[in-house]
Structures are given as structure tokens and as C-alpha cells.
Amino acid sequence: MEQNISQSTIEIIKKYNFVFQKKYGQNFLIDGRVLDKIIGAAQIGPDDCVLEIGPGIGTMTKRLAEAAGQVIAVEIDKNLIPILQEVLGEYDNITILNEDILKVDIPALVEQYNGDRPIKVVANLPYYITTPIIMGLFESNVPIDNITVMVQKEVALRMQEGPGSKDYGALSLAVQYYAEPYIVANVPPNCFIPRPKVGSAVIRLTRHKEKPVQVKNEQFMFRLIRASFNQRRKTLQNALHNMNELSLTKEEIVDALQTMGLSETIRGEKLSLSEYAKLSDLLCKE
Ligand code: SAM
């Protein structure tokens, strides 16, 4: 199977004189076992509508179309569109859109194709825009069941870490606020053409039915979190005080830390999501 995908990928590239564009993060997956793991982890069934970001030459799109009710594939590279149209020609449940996913009105797209029912998102992501894509999906409040994506291995680790780890940061907290992360598989560079310089991993983010913490002002909490990790080496007190946009006095910060029973010298990387939510409620004046 792997040999077939690798061969057919090379044949398609030759046939269309396709030139890989580094700026679009084009590393095509050529390992059938990894494709199976992605499709299995995403738990796709015939009633599902799947949004695929960056279908490339359509290798994964075919499998998605066979498992799902319908697939919407959004590809930025116009040179890939004729290839996709030919390779996927026999499927009548795939819509190919030549768009930049960061500019697409995803809620409108999902409503058009799936009403208010939740979709599943599957992608071998272009690594240069992993975070804006994932955060954009969560923050836009599109109805989503889960997001199953290939990302850089380090990024997958960061998404699932907790307080105290060196990989724990703003991304971990943001992802865990919206979803339950689960690393499905580690994927070495030889599973792609061309080979990326970094290791990869498939991660599934299952959206929480209910948020794990309640917070009065979500935006303020995320501003606090970003401020804490922007100056990681500083104490939380100094990092927050130095952020002018928050307009917090040292006294207010120390009072809040004391109310929570936390040390005045604690660093942001020690706080859990629920502690950030509490701190945010204590400090938010809006
Ligand atoms: N899904 C294919 C596979 O697994 O072989 C290709 C994955 S490749 C890592 C990333 C794909 O995303 C490429 O086809 C690239 O052109 C596309 N892409 C990059 N930036 C994009 C964007 N902003 N919007 C939509 N597609 C994008």
C-alpha cells in the first residue's frame, strides 16, 4: 500500500509537472498506515461532513470521501486544482474550493453544507499556519466534533502539556480550554514527499461539550495567559505588571495571588487552566 501511494504520488507529480511550493508547506503524505490511523482516529462515519484543509493531490481526500457523507476540501494552490479535479473526478461527494483557509468564512461554509450539525476537520496541516488555523476554528465557534491533524511533533506535545513542563504554554492552555487533546501517532519524515526537516505527529482535539472552566471574560483570560508566557522567565507578578495593555497595579496582582493562596513569586508556567480562570475573574474590571 505504502509503495503504491508513494509511486502514484511521484507519477502524478511528473504527469502534471507539479512544482512543490515551500511557502505553502507542501509535504505530501505517502504512508497508507498513517492515513488509516488519521481516518480511524477522526471516527468518521457516513453521516459526517468533513472539512479537509490543504488536500494536496487528494490522497487523503479519497479516503475521507469513502468514509464520510461529504467532504469539503479547501486548497490554496491553484496549480493543484486541476490535479484534484482529475484525481477525485469519480467521487460525487467532494467539493473542492480554491481558497486560503485563513480567509474563508468557515461558519458560513459549514452552514451552507451541513446546517447547524457539527463537522469534523481533518488535515495534514501546512505547518507555517498550524496555530492560526486551529485557534481560528475554535474561536469562530463553528460547530465541530473533532479536529484530527498532522502537526509538527513539538507543537503536538505543547498542545497536550500541563503545568510545570517546559513545553507548557499559551497554546496548551488555549487548546485545552476548547478541547481534549490526544496524540494518535508519531510520524517520521520518511512518510512524506518531500521529507520535512522535523518530526510530525497526528493529534486529535475533541471539542469539549462543556468548557472545563467557567470564566467571566474569556478574552481577558487569554490576554493574561499571553502576558504570562511572553515573559516566561519573570515572575507572574512582574510579567503581568509589565504588560501595559492590562493596566494592572502590583498591589492588585499581589492581592489576587494572595486570595488564591499562591506565592507572590510564582511563575506563570505553574498555573493550571482553572487557576488562570480564577485569576482572570479576580483581576478583570471589564
Ligand atoms: N493533504 C495533503 C497530503 O496529506 O498529502 C497535502 C498536505 S501538505 C502538508 C499541506 C497542504 O495545504 C498543501 O496542499 C498546501 O498547498 C495547502 N495549503 C497551504 N496553505 C494553505 C492555506 N492557507 N489554505 C488552504 N490550503 C493551504
Image (tube, helix red, strand yellow):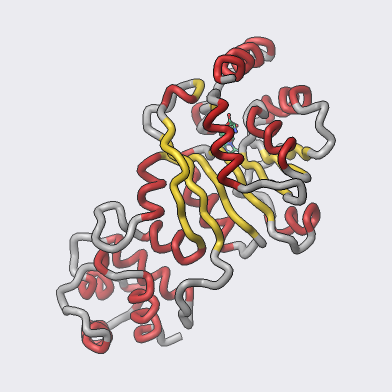
Residue drawn at (33%, 76%) of the image: 275
Residue drawn at (56%, 61%) of the image: 207
Q: Position of residue 90 (x, y in %)?
A: 82, 27
Location of residue 229 (image quadrant): bottom left
User: In the rendered image of this protein, does residue 94 appear above or below residue 255?
Assistant: above
User: In the rendered image of this protein, does residue 18 appear above or below residue 125?
Assistant: above
User: In the rendered image of this protein, does residue 104 appear above or below residue 195?
Assistant: below
Residue drawn at (65%, 42%) of the image: 52
Q: Position of residue 273 (x, y in %)?
A: 37, 70
Residue drawn at (40%, 84%) of the image: 281
In front here: 242 or 232?
232
Quadrant where the image shows the N terminus: top right
Location of residue 210 (image quadrant): bottom right
The quarter of the image that holds ligand 1 is top right
Q: Position of residue 79 (x, y in %)?
A: 68, 25
Q: Position of residue 42 (x, y in %)?
A: 59, 47
Q: How many marks?
A: 0
In front here: 203 or 28?
203
